[in-house]
């Protein structure tokens, strides 16, 4: 017997940090449809593999439906699975809690939705399976649902479906908190987890007793690598066999390029091209969104920072991928000469730290008013505190880089 385990589909959620790419119509279409396409890939995979069931462990949606299209896409997939005789067992999570979603939907009989006020067990006796789960009534469930799950049913393979933060994983809200021991104590053959967007297995000896499948489609630079779902094979119920299947249609990747001491701008671009080629090979042609970090000697790092055309040149050598951001760091070396005076460095850092987004807003507004024409980079969002804070941080870094260059006798 086999099941497919997926979670955190976030159908029709927004992507972070890709507004610049939306001017490219092909890129915009790929980005806007990525979560839908990944969901469709999940359904198509199930239609080919014909598992005994599919489980969806929460955050299938990203909040209240913004259009009827979200509902239509989901129902189309569920209908295809129903027609193929593949039942689905679904629990809600913090993003698609009962209090968030609309409820005027008639689901196919083969889609079983776990209740939100107490756990419930669904049996598939012909397949030898039992599914235990509970969804979220509200987005913030701060007590452990796992500790309320029922005992396993004898004679069946028991599968828990749970949206939870196991072990207080950093970077995620601590919803439905529990421990690996809590899951082990359930004595189920397997617990299908959602909420954490990276794959992770919980092992007892050589037996995997629970796992996060990760999300189906990465949506920001924090979610790198292949994303998809798991096939769980219970040929030996005491030792489930897990197989990961990538289903994402768009993937984030970091390019880390360290320039040689005597590197030129062209050398850096050549190195970026090499790293990009390697990344494309690693990901077998899946479209990539790149965040590129270039580490160079201070003089070159400062030159690249102020070169308005450099990002465009990086874009040219990474053709076929979307460029999200290029950042620069300075390499330290005895050959560079003395560092910036510690007192001066502290003063620069303190000056940058003392600026507020309001200060930057006022300054930029004044510059715009006095400018004879539109400013280069006029897409600056004066309403974004986070963006303005990044402007302050970059200003401090750039000044220190120029000071480093000057201290070594280089050009500023």
Image: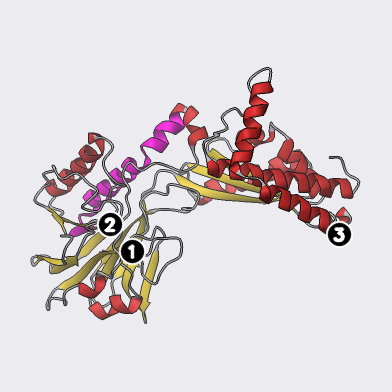
Which residue lies at the image location 21% right of the left edge and 37% below the top edge?
72
**Mark 2 surroundings: few (<14), some (14-19) or many (≥20) residues within 10 A:** many
Which stretch is magenta?
26-55
Q: What residue would you read off at disc 2?
A: 93
Q: What residue would you read off at disc 1?
A: 175
Assess whether residue 241 is covered by the magenta stretch. Answer: no
Q: Disc 1 vs disc 2: Cβ atoms closer than 8 Å?
A: yes
Q: What residue would you read off at disc 3?
A: 334
Where in the figure is residue 157, as x and y percent of width and height?
Answer: 18, 72
Q: In which quarter of the view is residue 172 placed?
A: bottom left
Residue extending furthest right?
409
Where in the figure is residue 76, as x and y percent of width and height?
Answer: 19, 40
- State the separation of the CA atoms marked 3 and 1: 49 Å
* Earlier-in-chain disc, 3 versus 1: 1
- State the separation of the CA atoms marked 3 and 2: 53 Å
Where in the figure is residue 125, as x and y percent of width and height?
Answer: 8, 67
* Earlier-in-chain disc, 1 versus 2: 2
Q: Nearer the viewer, residue 115 or 78?
A: 115
């Amino acid at each position: 017997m086999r099941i497919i385990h997926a979670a955190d589909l976030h159908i029709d959620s927004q992507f972070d940090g890709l507004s610049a790419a939306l001017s490219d119509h092909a890129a915009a279409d790929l980005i806007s449809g990525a979560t839908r396409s990944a969901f469709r890939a999940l359904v198509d995979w199930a239609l080919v593999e014909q598992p005994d069931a599919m489980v969806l462990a929460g955050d299938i949606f990203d909040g209240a439906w913004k259009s009827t299209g979200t509902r239509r896409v989901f129902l189309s997939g569920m209908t295809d699975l129903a027609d193929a005789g593949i039942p689905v067992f679904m629990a809600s999570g913090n993003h698609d809690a009962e209090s968030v979603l609309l409820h005027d939907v008639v689901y196919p009989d083969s889609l079983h939705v776990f209740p939100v006020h107490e756990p419930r067990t669904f049996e598939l006796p012909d397949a030898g399976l039992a599914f235990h789960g509970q969804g979220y009534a509200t987005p913030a469930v701060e007590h452990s649902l796992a500790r309320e799950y029922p005992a396993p049913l004898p004679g069946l393979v028991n599968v828990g479906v749970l949206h939870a933060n196991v072990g207080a994983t950093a970077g995620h809200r601590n919803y439905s908190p529990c421990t690996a021991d809590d899951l082990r104590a359930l004595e189920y053959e397997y617990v299908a987890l959602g909420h954490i967007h990276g794959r992770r297995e919980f092992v007892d000896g050589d037996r995997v007793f629970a796992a996060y499948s990760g999300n189906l489609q990465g949506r920001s630079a924090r979610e790198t690598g292949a994303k998809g779902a798991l096939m769980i094979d219970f040929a030996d119920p005491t030792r489930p066999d897990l197989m990961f299947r990538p289903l994402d249609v768009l993937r984030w990747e970091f390019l880390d390029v360290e320039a040689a001491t005597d590197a030129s701008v062209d050398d850096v671009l050549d190195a970026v091209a090499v790293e990009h080629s390697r990344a494309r090979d690693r990901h077998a042609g899946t479209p990539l969104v790149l965040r590129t970090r270039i580490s160079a000697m201070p003089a070159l790092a400062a030159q690249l920072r102020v070169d308005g055309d450099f990002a465009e040149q990086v874009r040219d050598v990474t053709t076929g991928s979307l460029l999200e951001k290029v950042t620069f760091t300075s390499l330290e070396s005895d050959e560079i000469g003395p560092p910036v005076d510690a007192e001066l460095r502290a003063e620069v850092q303190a000056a940058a730290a003392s600026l507020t987004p309001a200060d930057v807003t006022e300054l930029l507004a004044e510059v715009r008013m006095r400018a004879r024409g539109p400013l280069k980079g006029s897409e600056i969002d004066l309403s974004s505190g986070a963006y303005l804070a990044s402007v302050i941080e970059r200003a401090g870094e750039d000044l220190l880089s120029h000071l480093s260059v000057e201290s070594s006798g280089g050009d500023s």
